[in-house]
Image (cartoon, rainbow, N blue to C red):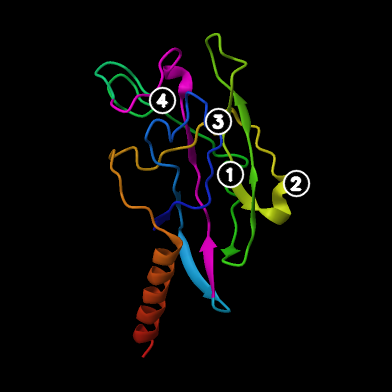
């Protein structure tokens, strides 16, 4: 299951803003669902491939339609993605168990662009972390500047899962589990 969870893009005037480029906000894979004392638990948020290689867009701005031969953020001239992976350290939401009762704060990583003459350019995005862990959430990796559009491979636009829909999915799952135990 994938859910658009708590992501807030604040760089409204940035030329690399994903919303401006009509791309989806990042979706994080929820690898497990369970119930503890009737609380929905999200387990093991995955954020392994966390960024596009922004070196492809020295002078280009994102447009609503990709012209042949003109790369967009994270896309090569041939249309393939250039993903950068971070397998160490914090890269997105803090891993762990979360219930619907948890409160979240936002941590903003600031990252310089790599290469070219724009080394001082900063791109800001915000990630949700549990509020009691925000003081220790230090995000310093370069590749956290521009989060992964997890639907980029198929260039599809699946519907967003809203909170109410997620509750319905959860209710159906509980009913199915109860029936299977009979």
Q: Residues within 10 Å of mark 4 (few under 14, many from 20)?
A: many
The image's mark for residue 145 is 3
Q: Is residue 180 above or below residue 163?
A: below
Element at badge 2? helix
Q: CA distance from mark 2 to mark 4?
A: 31 Å
Q: Is residue 108 above or below residue 179?
A: above
Sequence-wise, which precedes: disc 4 or disc 1? Answer: 4
Who is closer to the viewer here, 28 or 49?
Answer: 28
Kind of element beneath mark 4: loop
Residue 139 percent across, percent down from the top left: 65, 37
Q: Horizontal placement of 139 versus 153: left or right?
A: right
Q: Position of residue 171 (x, y in %)?
A: 41, 75
Magenta stretch encompasses residue 150: no
SS assignment at label 1 = strand
Q: How far, Cα to Cα, is label 3 from label 4?
A: 12 Å
Q: Which mark is residue 135?
A: 2
Residue 5 or 81: which is nearer the viewer? 5
Is 159 in front, or is 152?
A: 159
Mark carried by residue 73? 4
Q: Is residue 41 above or below residue 149?
A: below
What residue would you read off at disc 1? 127
Res. 165 image quadrant: bottom left
Q: How many angstroms separate mark 1 from mark 2 (CA)?
A: 13 Å
**In magenta stretch: residue 46:** yes
Q: Residue at x 52, y 62 (%)?
A: 42
Residue at figure coordinates x 75%, y 46% from the top left = 135
- Residues tagged 4 and 1 counted as in contact (Cβ below 8 A): no
Quarter-wise, where is residue 64 in the image?
Answer: top left
């Amino acid at each position: 299951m994938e859910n658009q969870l708590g992501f807030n893009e604040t760089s409204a005037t940035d030329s690399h803003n994903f919303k401006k480029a009509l791309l989806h906000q990042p979706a994080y894979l929820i690898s497990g669902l369970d119930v503890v004392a009737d609380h929905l638990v999200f387990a093991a948020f995955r954020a392994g491939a966390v960024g596009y290689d922004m070196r492809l867009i020295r002078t280009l701005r994102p447009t609503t339609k990709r012209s042949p031969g003109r790369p967009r953020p994270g896309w090569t001239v041939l249309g393939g993605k250039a993903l950068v992976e971070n397998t160490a350290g914090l890269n997105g939401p803090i891993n762990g168990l979360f219930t619907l009762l948890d409160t979240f704060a936002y941590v903003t990583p600031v990252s310089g662009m790599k290469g070219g003459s724009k080394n001082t350019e900063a791109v800001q995005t915000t990630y949700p972390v549990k509020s009691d862990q925000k003081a220790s959430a230090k995000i310093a990796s370069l590749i956290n500047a521009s989060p992964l559009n997890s639907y980029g491979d198929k260039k599809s636009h699946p519907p967003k899962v809203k909170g109410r829909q997620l509750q319905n999915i959860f209710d159906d799952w509980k009913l199915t589990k109860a029936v299977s135990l009979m």
